[in-house]
Image: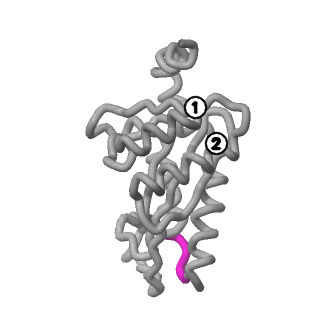
Amino acid sequence: FLDEASPQTTDNRQRVWSFGKPVKKKNTSKYRANTFGFYPINGKEVVEFEEESKAPNVCGFLRKIKDKNIGKQILLILDNAPQHTAQQTRRFAESLGIILVFLPVYSPDLNPIEFIWKSVRRVISKICFIKSEWSFRETIRTAFHRLAKRKSFMSGWLEKFQPEISKLLCR
């Protein structure tokens, strides 16, 4: 599973549960990191930071996925973002032997990596003060690697779709 996210320290999605009036802690440092992530069914997860999310950046990330998963057949499930469906991306994936499978339009909930990004944002929201952009990126990287080791994010997806994916791999 592949997708990008842009976690930031000023995210306003944090939810608070409290018996009394909640005390709000706000991170005053403002960092944002355009992040590419790969959440594998079996293989090595990959997370990298890019300045942009354009087709050349996706191609560079595909190369990193291939380099970290040498000798494995790679089937990537991703959304229909323009940088994913671009001819440059498709040709480059084909040259690497990577099979691209696009989810139906407007169905982000079918991509289990979305739940990892949601969890990464939750980890970030609990940190009161982030000292530098480097520490912010390391927090994202550490959280992503830890969360991507869990297969629970994809278990329901696998139960439903693994037979179809197996057919694609056995062509």
Name the image colouring: one colour
- Residue 17 is situated, as x and y percent measured from the top left of the image, at 42, 64
Residue visible at 45% across and 38% down in the picture: 91
Number of residues whose C-alpha sits closer than 10 Å to that of mark 1, classed few (under 14), some (14–19) or many (20 or more): some
Residue 108 at least partly seen? no
48 w.r.t. 166: above or below: below
Give yes or no for residue 110 being in the magenta stretch.
Answer: no
Residue that carries the numbered disc 2 in the rendered image? 66
Amino acid on which disc 1 is placed? Gly
User: Which mark is in front, 1 or 2?
Assistant: 1
Task: Report helix, strand or loop for mark 2.
Answer: helix
Q: Main secondary structure of the magenta part?
A: loop
Amino acid on which disc 2 is placed? Lys
Residue 13 at least partly seen? yes
Question: Nearest the camera: 10 or 56?
Answer: 56
Contact check, label 1 and label 2, Cβ < 8 Å: yes
Q: What segment is highlighted magenta in the picture?
A: 125-129
Q: Quadrant of residue 75?
A: top right
- Label 1 to label 2, Cα distance in Å? 9 Å
93 w.r.t. 26: above or below: above
- Residue 38 is situated, as x and y percent measured from the top left of the image, at 56, 46
Residue that carries the numbered disc 1 in the rendered image? 97
39 w.r.t. 118: above or below: above
Indicate which disc residue 86 carries.
none
Task: Report helix, strand or loop for mark 1.
Answer: loop
Residue visible at 66% across and 33% down in the picture: 42
